[in-house]
Image (cartoon, rainbow, N blue to C red):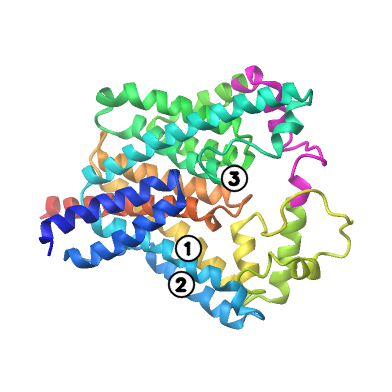
Amino acid sequence: MFPPPFLKRLSLWLAIASAATILLSIAVSQILLAVALGVLLLSGLPLKWPRVSIPLAGFLTWTLFALAASPDPRSGLAQVRKMLVFAMLLIVYSAVRTTGEAKCLTFFWMGIGTITAGRGLYQFAVDVAGARAAHRDFYTFYIADRIRGFMSHWMTFSGQELFVLILVLAFLLFAPDLKKWIWLGLPCALIVGLALVLSDTRSVWIAGIVAGCYLIWDWDKRALLAVPVLLGLGLLVAPSAIQERAKSIISPKKETDSNEHRIIVWRTGWEMIKVHPIFGVGPEEIRKPAVFYAYLPADIRRPLPDGYYGHLHNIYIHYAAECGIPAALALTAALILPLWDFRRALKLLPPGRSDRRFLLQAAIACVIGTAVSGVFEKNLGDSEVLTMFLAIMCLGYLARTETLARADILER
């Protein structure tokens, strides 16, 4: 039998390994997650859940109600299996017990995320060469199959790299030992930032700008004035394919860009919500063409424009349509509660840089980025993105708990 101190230490490193390897392989991460859960239960460590678990438990519970009310419960069982990912909340929050350990996990994410971004840059160079060899317009050649790092889809890659960039930026702005690590932080920010720009993922661009502006605003409000100037200059010197993609946000090409496609799925989702406001159409039912077309508004022309119609490209509309309005409200509460908790904890911190300020600000910016990108994509329906989001919330709540404890000591 292993001694408890060894099991406690093993729980920590398994939790870190499971959270960090999600940038490389979901299979490896989830195997480590299962092992970490078993070791945690044997370690004797107190089992703890962060406060965000309350609305998330409501979301999962209502998903089960929706599954029971579904016309085809068997097809929705994938949602039940996916619930294992939420064990990340228990594992990380129970095993990672100090801000130093939390910071170690963020360093792993930054390092692995930079390697992943570097692989994405290599993939971009290969795509450029491929378009030239095929004598094709690069924009249309690239848009349907973009850089993805070690992931299976560019949306997953972009969603994860958004978190990595936010962590690096929060570290550069708020961590106490910047001089010691700036030689590592700046190259990470440049490589990850460049990969996100070249990913052509507009929802992540918008989310990154909003989350980044929040961090800069809380660091130095005057510096925020430089953001529009830098964005404008960056767009001017960007390759034509990037300029074209940015322009497509307001002026899309119907044959290549997905603006019209998203409006169609959102409108279809609203029709589902109006008919099934309580339990939705059922977990995993939206991906069935017969179900989707049954709610497609009659005024929409067919054939539909190119795009993926297996989900609704908006977490708020999608989960309301799939599992009912109560599920969407619970998920929204899971985004609002951490913002409330972390901002209140920030007010209790003494002025200046600190690891707790870094973790709290990073967690807030990640929630903001998730909430914004979730308007345009079903980001939290992606297990790889969800895993990182849950682990980052745990680190934010760890910093909050330490902050509240120290504030109580000072008051005494």
Q: Is residue 217 left or right of residue 196?
A: left
Q: Does residue 312 sit above or below 284 in this rendering? A: above
Q: Nearer the viewer, mark 2 or mark 3?
A: 3
Q: Is residue 390 left or right of residue 368?
A: left
- Residue 58: numbered disc: 2
Residue on which disc 3 sits: 153
Looking at the image, is 247 positioned above or below residue 25?
A: above
Pick the residue in front: 43 or 227.
43
Q: Amino acid at mark 2?
A: Gly
CA gap, disc 1 to disc 3? 28 Å
**Residue 297 location (% of width, % of height):** 83, 64
- Quadrant the N terminus occupies: bottom left
User: Where residue 112 sits: x, y (%)?
Assistant: 39, 37
Residue count near mark 3 (Cα–Cα under 10 Å), binned few <14, some 14–19, many ≥20:
few
> Which label was assigned to residue 333?
1
Q: Is residue 231 magenta?
A: no
Question: Marks 1 and 3: which is nearer the front?
Answer: 3
Query: Left or right: where does residue 176 sit relative to residue 319?
Result: left
Which span is picked out in magenta?
A: 234-261
